[in-house]
Image (tube, grey):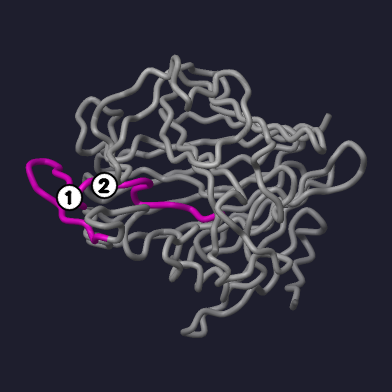
Amino acid sequence: MKIKEISHLKDSCIMELFGSMHDGEVVDSCELTNKNGMRLKVTNYGATITSLNIPLKNGEFVDVVLGFDTLEAYIKSFDLESAPYFGATIGRYAGRINNSIFSLNGKAFHLNKNNNNNSLHGGNIGFSQKMWRAKNVKKGKNPSITFAYFSADGEENYPGGLSVEITYMVSEDNELIIEYKAISTEDTIVNLTHHSYFNLDGHDSDILEQELIVNSQKMVETTSENVPTGRLLELENNPFDFNNPKKCPSKIDNTYVLEKENEFAASLFNKNNNLKMTVYTNQPGVHIYVGGNCFNTVKGKENANYHALSGICFETQNFPDAPNNEHFPNAVLKKGEIYYHKTIYKFQSF
């Protein structure tokens, strides 16, 4: 793999050629490394995380996210019967918009349909398939990189030109910190999230023996198509109550309500290597999803066969379909105002 020499970045950041789009546009990746050896690789195609190597107490490393070795595999994965969105940035609106329609300022907006009759994760070609511009690479302590994308007025039929920036940082405390900022030329709706599939036992494994905690008392009720009904369900005596640690379920696709400020949102623990991940966010919800199936069609990293139990997502975000439910948290971004979203994935090895 060709390496671009960027001398002033030294060892904390290495830029590499990752591939080329079908139109010839070059795609790069950046590797950020902290003092402990924690290594993050991210590409400007979809502002996508491709690997995240975490140091263990015994001196070994484990890659805790699913992904592909080549750009071509990422592109092909969006043609699968259920695109996995491995490591991608999701927008303009994460989750489903019911019937692909919402009203804003008295006007109805008809979005592109890509999930039965609904719009999912931004539509036909969301932020996960866009080319982002790398900027503001910072070396040394807490290395970071910022990606920028401009979503034109009318893209996927969303109103307003939206300028988006996402910053990935690897802290000295073994945290992956993700910050999102956006500003629009017109009133619009925004709900951004990150879509890595985590597996603390390594990306070529399953998550069924790992312990999950979700710090929530309620979840969003949904229909058979996973569209919110507008109701919130109490989790007491509910099989999806993970306030106490339980093994990861084989099937889950639920949005949990986060009402406890300054507390963690969720955690995952793998007893095989004593690695723990804790999730913190300023968002009102976290969507938990188990999956990663590539249907034996696209091979994962190191020729892995990803299946329906390969990883678990912690999509910190607003509620799906919030624009169509007035009592859900506000998803409207007013013209000139700033959208800000911060999420931390903290890793601890015991």
Residue 90 is one of the magenta-drawn residues: yes
Asked if the residue under mark 1 is in contact with the one under mark 2, i.e. CB atoms within 8 Å, the reply is: yes
Name the residue type under label 2.
Ile
- Indicate the secondary structure of the residue bearing disc 1: strand
Direction from residue 317 to residue 247 in the image, left or right: right
Look at mark 2 in the image and give the residue it sits on.
97
Name the residue type under label 1.
Ile
Look at mark 1 in the image and give the residue it sits on.
101
Q: Residue at x 34, y 48 (%)?
A: 93
> How many numbered circles does the render carry?
2
Direction from residue 17 to residue 35 in the image, left or right: right
Span shown in magenta: 87-113
Q: Residue at x 37, y 35 (%)?
A: 318
Residue 34 image position (x, y, % from top left): 78, 45
Q: Quadrant of residue 16?
A: bottom right
User: Residue 44 versus residue 87: which sits nearer the camera?
Assistant: 87
Q: Classify 10 Å Cα crowding around label 1: few (below 14), some (14-19), many (20 and above).
A: some
The N terminus lies in quadrant? bottom right
Q: Residue at x 53, y 56 (%)?
A: 147
Direction from residue 200 to residue 57 in the image, left or right: right
Q: Classify 10 Å Cα crowding around label 2: few (below 14), some (14-19), many (20 and above).
A: many
Residue 292 image position (x, y, % from top left): 55, 55
- Indicate the secondary structure of the residue bearing disc 2: strand
